[in-house]
Image: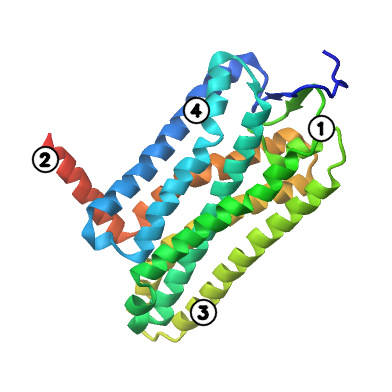
């Protein structure tokens, strides 16, 4: 098939992490294990929060939705990768590639916005404790959740819809294990100027404003902590927001690492390996961080485990 042929629907080939046949079985077992652990941990968080009435608070409401978003975020890429390794096929359809890019963007944005909502919750809890129940009422929490979903669903449309205007060669080899938007744009046979402008605008807006909100919230939190004279009071604040701050640092740290690496190195394989950090490692680590650093979550998980064991 002539790669210069632009007629018909293009065929996308996901080259994956490695083309060496000897390590395909190792990659399959590794990523299957990581995926199952990620799904199990996040489902455990959701069930623990749902079953414990003491955790029916705004922070855990957003945390359960973050866990759901992490499951969906990982599920947009890893199952297809595992299927390709198992069947020894690298093909993903044109429609499948566009769909994967869209939902990957949606759940990535949703993670980002939920972390922003959780930062606002921490800010209100620390800086306005007397008005916390009034400000963070169920109606506001529901409105914030609907808003995060709405922005995420709409925010993923410009980049994905603009892909439909591009033409591709007959066979497209993507040096990645999923259809990452910048890499697919780089392989287009038509002009991608408008697509790159849309990509930069969406990334800038959806990255700048949530991060600004998080930094503002924590600047006020730190200012309030410095005014607390007792060590016990500072520890209480840290226990309230420490887990969230760790998750925020992991999320933005891995994403920043990916984009900085793409600027400093032209080795596509390096970028692919680093992408594993925010597509697999971060969703897997989030429940681990919350269950380790949060006493309420530890108590809820122990209670859930005891109830399961006693029912057997």
Q: Which residue is mark 3?
A: 220
Judged from the image, the secondary structure of the residue bearing numbered disc 2 is: helix
Earlier in the chain: of badge 3 and badge 2, it is 3
Work out whether 55 lies above or below 108: below
Discs 2/1, front? 1
The residue under the point 62% across, 30% down is 96
CA distance for labels 3 and 4: 42 Å
Question: Which numbered disc covers residue 310?
Answer: 2
Report the side of 207 relative to 227 (left or right): right
Q: Which residue is mark 4?
A: 30
Number of callouts: 4
Crowd around label 4: few <14 · some 14–19 · many ≥20 (10 Å): few
Discs 3/4, front? 3
Judged from the image, the secondary structure of the residue bearing numbered disc 4 is: helix
Earlier in the chain: of badge 4 and badge 2, it is 4
CA distance for labels 1 and 4: 35 Å
The residue under the point 39% across, 44% down is 42
Residue 193: in sight, yes or no? yes
Q: Which residue is mark 1?
A: 167
């Amino acid at each position: 098939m002539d790669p210069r042929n632009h007629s018909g629907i293009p065929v996308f080939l996901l080259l994956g992490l490695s083309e060496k046949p000897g390590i395909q079985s190792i990659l399959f077992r590794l990523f299957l294990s990581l995926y199952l652990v990620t799904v199990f941990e996040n489902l455990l968080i959701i069930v623990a929060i749902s079953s414990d009435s003491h955790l029916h608070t705004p922070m855990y409401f957003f945390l359960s939705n973050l866990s759901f978003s992490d499951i969906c975020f990982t599920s947009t890429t890893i199952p297809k990768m595992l299927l390709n390794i198992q069947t020894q096929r690298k093909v993903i359809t044109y429609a499948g590639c566009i769909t994967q890019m869209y939902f990957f963007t949606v759940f990535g944005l949703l993670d980002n916005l939920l972390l922003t909502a959780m930062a606002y919750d921490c800010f209100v809890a620390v800086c306005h404790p007397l008005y916390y129940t009034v400000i963070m009422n169920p109606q506001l929490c529901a409105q914030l959740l609907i808003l995060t979903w709405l922005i995420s669903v709409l925010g993923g449309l410009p980049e994905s819809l603009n892909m439909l205007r591009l033409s591709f060669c007959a066979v497209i080899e993507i040096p990645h294990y999923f259809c990452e938007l910048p890499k697919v744009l780089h392989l287009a046979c038509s002009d991608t100027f408008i697509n790159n402008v849309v990509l930069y605008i969406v990334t800038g807006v959806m990255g700048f404003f949530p991060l600004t909100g998080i930094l503002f919230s924590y600047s006020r939190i730190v200012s309030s902590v410095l005014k607390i004279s007792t060590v016990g009071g500072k520890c209480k604040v840290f226990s309230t927001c420490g887990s969230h701050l760790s998750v925020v640092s992991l999320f933005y740290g891995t994403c920043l690492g990916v984009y900085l690496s793409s600027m400093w190195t032209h080795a596509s394989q390096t970028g692919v390996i680093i992408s594993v950090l925010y597509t697999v490692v971060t969703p897997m680590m989030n429940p681990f961080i919350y269950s380790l650093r949060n006493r309420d979550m530890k108590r809820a998980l122990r209670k859930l485990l005891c109830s399961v064991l006693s029912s057997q």
